[in-house]
Amino acid sequence: MSAYASRMARRTVGSWLQGPGSVTRDPDDFPGRRLGLPAEGRGSVAGVGRRLIALCVDWAIALALSTLLFDRDQWATLGVFALEQTLLVGLVGAGVGHRLLGMQVVRVDGERPGFGLALLRAVLLSLAVPALIWDRDQRGLHDRWSGTVLRRT
């Protein structure tokens, strides 16, 4: 076993045995660093609070439309939400909630996702579980699998 592998094995086992907070983190690390994004301000990864508020805004719009058009059917609400996410993220890179809170969905290379990736992202987001599993860059599985990131504008 190489010295690096041995050191990583001790660190992994040690962190598991010692509990949370035992793994030392790079003080210069921040969400988006591995993607080439700034630590804060325009172009940085959007924060959790901002994302949750945007989600609530988009869900409220879907619920209102579903109530008006489909007698508040739960599946219709989910469908309206997914359709809104697909169309608006595909066209302009942001749903209504994203736009109101100063965020935009882009591919990792900075381009608009287009309809294909927006549809994949909306379907995964509608399943909820992929959106709840995040990486160090604060990207849910719905963003990782669609190759997108939610940035501040």
Image (cartoon, grey):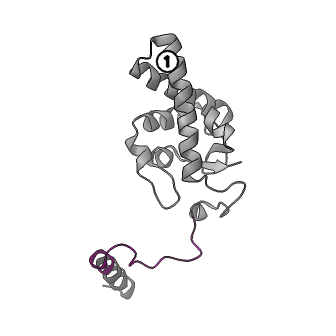
In front: 22, or 120? Answer: 22
Looking at the picture, how far across and down is residue 83, in whole percent?
Answer: 53, 25
Q: Is residue 116 above or below residue 62?
A: below
In front: 29, or 63? Answer: 63
In front: 90, or 16? Answer: 16
On the rendered structure, is 138 left or right of 127? right
Q: Where does the magenta region start and end?
A: 14-30
Name the residue: 57% across, 71% down: 29
Which of the 4 image quadrants contains residue 19?
bottom left
Which residue is situated farthest in the bottom direction here? Answer: 3
Disc tally is 1
Determine the main secondary structure of the stretch shown in magenta: loop
Kind of residue at disc 1: Ser
* Residue 121 visible at all: yes
Based on the picture, tell me whether residue 16 belongs to the magenta stretch. yes
Which of the 4 image quadrants contains residue 126?
top left
Quadrant of the frame with the N terminus: bottom left
Name the residue: 56% across, 32% down: 58
Q: Secondary structure at mark 1?
A: helix
Name the residue: 56% across, 46% down: 51
On the rendered structure, is 3 left or right of 101? left
Q: Residues within 10 Å of mark 1 (few under 14, many from 20)?
A: many
- The residue to which callout 1 is attached is 66
Looking at the picture, how far across and down is residue 77, in whole percent?
Answer: 46, 23
Based on the picture, tell me whether residue 69 belongs to the magenta stretch. no
Name the residue: 45% across, 54% down: 134
Q: Is residue 148 above or below residue 79?
A: below
* Residue 95 visible at all: no
On the rendered structure, is 138 left or right of 100? left
Q: Is residue 22 above or below residue 67?
A: below
